[in-house]
Image (spheres, rainbow, N blue to C red):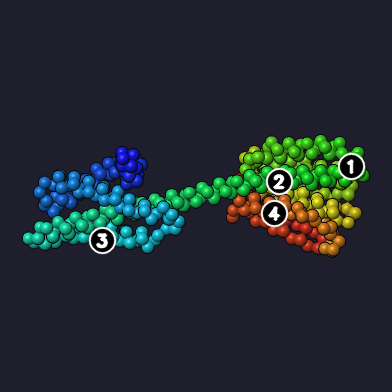
């Protein structure tokens, strides 16, 4: 039985902090009520002020209790209800001051009703208003936390999928070379080791220094240069970055570069033309990559069912990590595939 009563008290009063806040708030409330009572000439003003203060605090808790019945699933701000409660509070306070100046002569009982009834309604309305506003903000906060947790989980999933995707592509390419140019395999394995070390041990953070990411890109390009040899015509214009304060999402730019090498390599042309550029401008990172491709769509090789995974993944990561802070443009012309990406520095 005592446990049930304890639960009921918790529901009515809430946390013990609320009781402490009520005690603190009762001091200025008592002083305000006492000034009002003295102004209207009520005898035993301290006793009346104490009773009125206790009744007002009790009314606030009662209003809070009534409001929490239907605020548990509150997801949108009930603007109409809030406006109504504020109007009631203002009207009740206004009436109390009006009635203090113009009481009914010889009508003691009616005067008491005309004072205590709006006083009680005002306290209930204050309690309901406090609970509604707090419940709305708490529900919005819980929704934001749930969305953030979901985004973080999805982001980690996407990042964990990038390394296997890169590894599968690289091993497939190395298998082809092992059949035709096996002498290139040893240096490629050394470069692959450096690349995998970064993806496994250093690219697990949400944001990493841009200089580390550029070093990883440099290793990847060196890997492709060994593999492609004289067939590759590469133009690079990458600004040197030495500060570790400029950060970027890991394994972001490499997806576009890997995509450029893959599409150019699959073309029937004798030479592969790739241009990579990265510049810092203000608080922005400006990145672009261009690669040659077959002019006719029918001459381009058919992609497998996993093709485009990296591009789709990086698009989702951009939406999660750079909402409203990025601009991605892709131009798939006849002989030139161009990607331009603008990011805000982190």
Mark 3, secondary structure of its residue? helix
Front-lying residue, 100 or 68: 68
C-alpha distance separating marks 1 and 4: 30 Å
Mark 1, secondary structure of its residue? helix
C-alpha distance separating marks 4 and 2: 11 Å
The residue carrying mark 3 is: 91
The residue carrying mark 4 is: 312
C-alpha distance separating marks 4 and 3: 58 Å
C-alpha distance separating marks 3 and 1: 87 Å
In the image, residue 119 lies at what x, y percent? 22, 55
Instruction: For label 2, count other residues whose C-alpha is less than 10 Å away and answer few (under 14), some (14-19) or many (20+).
Output: some
Mark 2, secondary structure of its residue? helix
266 sits to left or right of 240: right
The residue carrying mark 2 is: 162
Q: Residue at x 44, y 58 (%)?
A: 76
Q: Please determine whether, in this image, residue 288 is positioned above or below residue 160.
A: below
Mark 4, secondary structure of its residue? helix
The residue carrying mark 1 is: 178
Question: Which is more N-terminal, label 2 or label 4?
Answer: 2
Quadrant of image for the C terminus: top right
Q: Residue at x 78, y 45 (%)?
A: 168
Whether label 3 touches label 1, CB < 8 Å: no
In the image, residue 343 lies at what x, y percent? 64, 51
Instruction: For label 1, count other residues whose C-alpha is less than 10 Å away and answer few (under 14), some (14-19) or many (20+).
Output: few
171 sits to left or right of 102: right
Query: Is residue 268 at least partly visible in the picture?
Result: yes
Question: Which is more N-terminal, label 3 or label 2?
Answer: 3
C-alpha distance separating marks 2 and 1: 24 Å
Q: Residue at x 80, y 44 (%)?
A: 170
């Amino acid at each position: 039985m005592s446990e049930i009563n304890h639960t009921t008290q918790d529901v009515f009063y809430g946390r013990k902090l609320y009781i402490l806040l009520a005690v603190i708030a009762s001091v200025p409330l008592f002083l305000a009520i006492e000034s009002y009572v003295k102004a209207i000439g009520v005898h035993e003003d301290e006793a009346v002020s104490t009773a009125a203060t206790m009744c007002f605090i009790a009314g606030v808790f009662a209003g809070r209790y009534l409001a929490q019945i239907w605020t548990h699933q509150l997801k949108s701000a009930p603007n109409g209800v809030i406006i109504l409660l504020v109007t009631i509070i203002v009207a009740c306070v206004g009436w109390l001051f009006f009635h203090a100046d113009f009481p009914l002569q010889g009508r003691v009982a009616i005067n008491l009703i005309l004072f205590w009834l709006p006083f009680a309604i005002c306290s209930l309305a204050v309690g309901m208003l406090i609970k509604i506003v707090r419940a709305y903000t708490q529900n919005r906060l819980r929704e934001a936390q749930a969305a953030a947790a979901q985004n973080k989980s999805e982001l980690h999933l996407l990042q964990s999928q990038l390394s296997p995707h890169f590894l599968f592509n690289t091993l497939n390419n190395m298998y082809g070379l092992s059949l035709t140019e096996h002498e290139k395999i040893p240096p490629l394995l050394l470069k692959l080791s450096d690349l995998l070390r970064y993806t496994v041990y250093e690219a697990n953070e949400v944001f990493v220094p841009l200089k580390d990411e550029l070093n990883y890109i440099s290793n990847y390009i060196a890997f492709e240069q060994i593999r492609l040899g004289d067939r590759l015509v590469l133009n690079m214009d990458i600004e040197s970055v030495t500060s570790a304060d400029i950060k970027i999402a890991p394994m972001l730019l490499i997806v576009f570069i890997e995509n450029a090498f893959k599409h150019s390599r699959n073309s029937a042309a004798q030479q592969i033309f790739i241009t990579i550029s990265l510049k810092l401008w203000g608080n922005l990172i400006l990145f672009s990559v261009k690669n040659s491709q077959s002019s006719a769509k029918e001459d381009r090789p058919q992609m497998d069912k996993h093709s485009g995974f990296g591009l789709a993944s990086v698009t989702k990561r951009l939406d999660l990590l750079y909402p409203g802070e990025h601009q991605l443009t892709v131009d798939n012309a006849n002989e030139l595939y161009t990607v331009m990406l603008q990011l805000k520095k982190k």
